[in-house]
Each structure stands twice: as structure tokens, then as C-alpha cells.
Image (tube, helix red, strand yellow):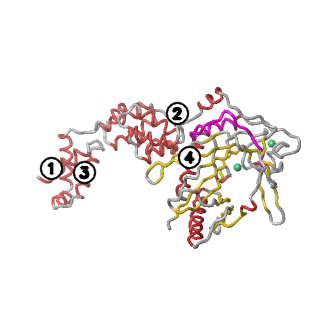
Amino acid sequence: MEYEAIIGLETHVQLKTKSKIWCGCANEFGAPPNTNVCPVCLGMPGVLPVANEEALRLTILTGLLLNSTIPRYAKFDRKNYFYPDMPKNYQVTQFDKPSTVGGFVEFEFNGGTSRINLTRAHLEEDVGKNFHFDRNSGVDFNRAGVPLLEIISEPEITSSDMAYEYLNALKDILIYGGVSDCDMEKGMVRCDVNVSIRPKGQKELGKKIEIKNMNSFSGVRNALNYEIPRQIEVLTKGGQHHQETRRWDDVGGITETMRSKEMAHDYRYFPEPDLMPFEPTDAWLAEIKTRVVELPLAKKQRFIKDYQLPPADAQAFVWDVPLGSYFESVAKKSKNPKAVANWVINNLRAKLAENGGSLADLKFKPEHLVELIELVDGKKISSAAAQQVFAEMFTSGEAPALIVEKKGLAQVSDTGAIEKFCDEVIAANPKPSADFKAGNAGALNFLKGQVMKLSKGKANPGVVGEILEKKLKS
Ligand code: ZN
Ligand code: MN
């Protein structure tokens, strides 16, 4: 029998706020243990939380970026459990009325575009972090109370590679939207996996098994690459699955039972009495809408379509946002956007890296780059000369036409002048000339190079080739 895997992902993302969600402590990674703490985030009795508006804004912004519906009524709930990283013995989260509902993530996969729908995203507080030493353990509460968004996908992912691409796309969107830095090494993104197996063609889902403890997206992919065949093997051998939570062992490369359904938590959710329900107004939503940016995939596809860019160039502009905007400002003025992309990626970016400096204080104007490309396309200067013009333009900010004139870089297409150079080169190089006549095609390139040298790079290489060939073949 053929089986298929059905995967759903629960992704926790730390929101990029200055302070924590219910108190004024800094939301900052890497501070000495328990230095960004106060009675509120330490869960002392009697303290009252005050919601961080920016965390609420970023939650809604995320919903808008992910095409979700933003309910006009959301509320907070207490999820009760006992664990040392959560001294209140409950986590404030959103249970039945989350801040965003539905939505989807689109990404490139298998040569096409895949869409995975989302169930919801809810806002909650992060908890502390346990550290285990040789003889004792400790808890660092710096992370407790950091705003955390839990983004839940529908069970629509069908392979480990697809899960991996979904996660990367989600991360790209969140970074692009300014919602989270998504630094995995700093624990800003954490992901749990639900996976079940069913015979291909069957409608109802198999028994759901949860996997925890992956600390990277490739860890998620590896865990699935282990877990899916394992589950299929159990079924093939006539066994059955029970709902359970398994732990991924990154070193051993296996999953192991962590807890079974019998031990599943009853979180006894109830409404958080110390926080107001959250009811975003029209004005709020309108203000947050102004923060929505074009998504990375949409931008990439637009650059490919509007400017005929190769996907790799489009991707380069998606990831270097200032460079991408600069490219676009020049490309809009040019008849040859592909050449603009080449100059910006291959020359401008290198020059900036070499000389420091930024796009904001470039000496030359976008029009100058447009003009330079027109000079090349109109065969007024050779591409070798264009490099010189660009270098000069970069340092002095002078117009390309002026530089061409000053440095005498105008390309010679005048056949009379080129013929003279060719005659001279043929006379000075009897051996390569004879080689070419004898059928060694490579010898022509050498002669061509000599003519270019003689013309100080100004001869039109195409014309040089034609004339040389004509002369040697006659
Ligand atoms: Zn605090
Ligand atoms: Mn959660």
C-alpha cells in the first residue's frame, strides 16, 4: 500500500519590540541572566500586566502580511501548567479568540508556487529558559514575557522539503515585514511539527504525532525524514500509532517518545481577568496597513516579469532592499533594465563594498548610469571602455559622455581606421596569421586582441573580427 504524510507546523516567533509584552523590561537577547526582569515578568503575586501596544500592532501587521482575517474582537486566556520556566504557573495566550484567523503562505516549490493555508496566529508571552549544570539547574527569566506569536498552519504540507521551504518563506516574510528578526540561533523562531500518515487516497487523517525539540529548519527537515519512514514502517508491519509527542534527538538523528496521550496536558484554559479584550478600531487597522510591504516572493516575481531579470538577480534585489530600490529607480528610466541589473549587481555593489560608502551618497546620478548603458548599446563605446567610464563616474560623478570625450574612449567603428590596425597586426604577426589560414580558429582571437590593444580598446571588437577574417581568408 502507498502511504502519504500530512504535516502541520506550529511556529513560534518572537516579535521585534523594544520591551516585553506586559512590562517595561527590555526585549533583548544575550544580557546576563535575570537582568531584564521585574516583578511582572517574574510572576510575583499581585502584579498587573499592561499590554505593549507595539506587540499588538506587530501581531496585526503579521496577519495582514499573511493574508489573514483580523477579528474585531480578540482576548487573552490563561493556559495553566506547572514548570520551572513559568513561575505564574500559567502562560498568557489566546485560546478561542485569537488576533488573526486564516491566511496563507506562498513559496516557490518544485518549479512552481505552493500555497499553504494558515489556521490562525495567536499572541502569547514567551517563558524563561532552563539551564542545566553539573550539580544544579537554573532559570533565566530574561526571555519570560517576550512577545511571541504562534503561527499555526493547516495540515497541508506533504513532505519534509515542503515543510522546509514553507518555514523559510514564512521567515522571509516576517523579516521583510519588520515583524521579527527570526534569528534561529537566538531562539527567535521555534517550530513544532505535527505529522500523520494515511493510505494514499484516504480522506481522514491518521493518528497525529507531534515532534518537538528541533532547533533549526534543517532540524525540522531531518526529523521528518526520520519520522515519516518510521511511521510508514510501523503501519506496513501491521502496527498502529497512538497519539503521542516525540522528541527529536539532533545528535542521534532519531525521534523518541516524550509523552503519550494518557499524559497529555489539560491546560484548563480560562479568560485572563487582568487584561482587556483586544478590539482593534478602523483607525488602528488603517494605520497598521500603511506598514504592509510588498512580500519578497511578489517582489521577486515582479522584478522577473517587469524587468526581464534572471531569477538570481531578482533574488539579489529582494534581499538587498536598498540595492533593489536603487535598481528600480534606474531601471524605470532605462530601455535596458537587464543591463542596469548587471551594472548594479556586478559593478556598483562591488565598488561600494570596496570603497565603503552607501547608495545614498553616490556621486553620479541614476541618469548617468542610464546614459552609460545607452553608450554601450549604441556601440559608441566598447564594454571595456564602459568599465573605465564607470570607474571614473563613480569617483568624480561626471557625466559619461564627458568622460568618454575627455579620455578619448569613443569606439572606433570606422572601417578605414580599423583596417589600418588590422594590416599592421597581420604584418607584425606572421605565425598566428599563417596558423589561422591553416585552420586554427583560435589564432584569430589572439590577433583580435592585438588589434584591440593597438586601438587602445577603442576599436569595435565585432568589426575587428570581421575585417581580420576577411583579410586573412582572401
Ligand atoms: Zn519585566
Ligand atoms: Mn504556544
Q: Is ligand 2 less than 8 Å from the beta carbon at label 4? A: no
Expressed as whole percent of the image width and height from the top left, the position of residue 389 reads 38, 38
Secondary-structure class at tag 2: helix
User: Which mark is nearer the camera, 2 or 4?
Assistant: 4
Question: Looking at numbered disc 3 in the image, what kind of residue is underneath it?
Answer: Lys
Question: Looking at numbered disc 2 in the image, what kind of residue is underneath it?
Answer: Asp
Q: Which residue is mark 1?
A: 470
Q: Which residue is mark 3?
A: 448
Q: Which mark is residue 117?
A: 4
User: Which mark is nearer the camera, 4 or 1?
Assistant: 4
User: Are the residues tagged 1 and 3 within 8 Å (C-beta)?
Assistant: no
Question: Looking at numbered disc 1 in the image, what kind of residue is underneath it?
Answer: Lys
In primary-sequence order, the first of circles 2 and 4 is: 4
In primary-sequence order, the first of circles 2 and 1 is: 2
Corner quadrant of residue 194: bottom right
Question: Looking at numbered disc 4 in the image, what kind of residue is underneath it?
Answer: Asn
Q: Nearer the viewer, residue 331 or 227?
A: 227
Q: Which residue is mark 2?
A: 361
Expressed as whole percent of the image width and height from the top left, the position of residue 466 reads 19, 47
Q: Nearer the viewer, residue 389 or 301?
A: 301
Q: Which residue is located at x 18 percent, y 44 percent?
A: 420
Would you call the spot at circle 2 few (<14 residues within 10 Å), some (14-19), or many (20 or more)? few
Q: Which residue is located at x 63 percent, y 61 percent?
A: 207
- Outermost residue, left direction? 474
Expressed as whole percent of the image width and height from the top left, the position of residue 290 reads 59, 30
Q: Nearer the viewer, residue 212 or 319?
A: 212
The Cα–Cα distance between marks 2 and 4, rounded to whole angstroms, is: 43 Å
